[in-house]
Image (cartoon, grey):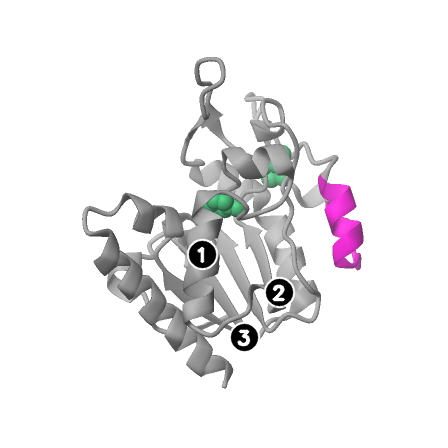
Amino acid sequence: MATTTSRTAGAAEFVPEGADLAALRRAATGCRGCELYKPATQVVFGSGPETARLVLVGEQPGDVEDRQGEPFVGPAGRLLDKALDEADLAREGVYLTNAVKHFKFVPAERGKRRIHKTPTRGEVVACLPWLRAELARVRPDLVVCLGATAAKAVLGSSFKVSERRGRVERVEDQDVIATVHPSAVLRAPDRDEAYRGFVADLRVVRAHLG
Ligand code: URA
Ligand code: SF4
């Protein structure tokens, strides 16, 4: 369809066909599928073993991830590590990634942490070819969507985490479950309660893996 806008066509043309995770990761450094690569420090691709039975999908890298180039290495990652541990899931055996691979943020004053900005639906859709390629390569037993952005990316834009969290659903031959995002637990008015709910969902994940 002809268009007069400068909207980019998404990540598809940058995703090498039949590539393994290492090659996908390398190719993602050159992605120009949307505008988010411009202000970000670097792409933050998924991380973990190709043999993982579990893929965890977050929203997008945060401030610390953008600087270090690895997913879930900041405050949300620390909470996630603790919760995984409590649910008897080892992080080493999990493939961790995000719906969107570049950090979207509002610039902060010098020396301050930059403020995360939720990606638009268009940006999530633009980045989806990377997540699809990761899932096709890892072929996990279960995909865990952390928060609304990941859940909408994988389960459709009408998905409501508050209504459907903690239940394994079958989507396009893939078992998927959604729960809250660890950052939402950190921000919750009753953090202990939110954390218990998060761990309870991860225990459903643990039970599903058998
Ligand atoms: N939040 C996410 O969704 N992903 C990260 O990698 C870090 C924080
Ligand atoms: Fe490509 Fe995704 Fe980064 Fe956009 S956010 S440039 S689609 S990797």
The residue pinned by badge 2 equals: 92
Based on the picture, tell me whether residue 25 belongs to the magenta stretch. Answer: yes
The residue pinned by badge 3 equals: 173
The disc, 2 or 3, on the residue closer to the chain's N-terminal end is 2
Taking the image as shown, residue 84 lies to the left or right of residue 48, namely left
Taking the image as shown, residue 57 lies to the left or right of residue 13, namely left
How far, Cα to Cα, is label 1 from label 2?
13 Å
Quadrant of the image containing the N terminus: top right
**Residue type marked 3:** Asp
How far, Cα to Cα, is label 2 from label 3?
25 Å
Q: Which of marks 1 and 3 is in front?
A: 1
The residue pinned by badge 1 equals: 80
**Residue type marked 2:** Glu
* Magenta span: 15-28
Among the 4 quarters of the image, the one containing residue 203: bottom left
Q: Is mark 1 on a helix, strand or loop?
A: helix
The x and y percentages for residue 18 are: 79, 59
For image coordinates 51% across by 37% down, the residue present is 123
Question: Ligand 2 near label 3 (Cβ, under 8 Å)?
Answer: no
**Residue type marked 1:** Leu
- Tell me: residue 204, above or below residue 44: below
The x and y percentages for residue 176 are: 46, 69
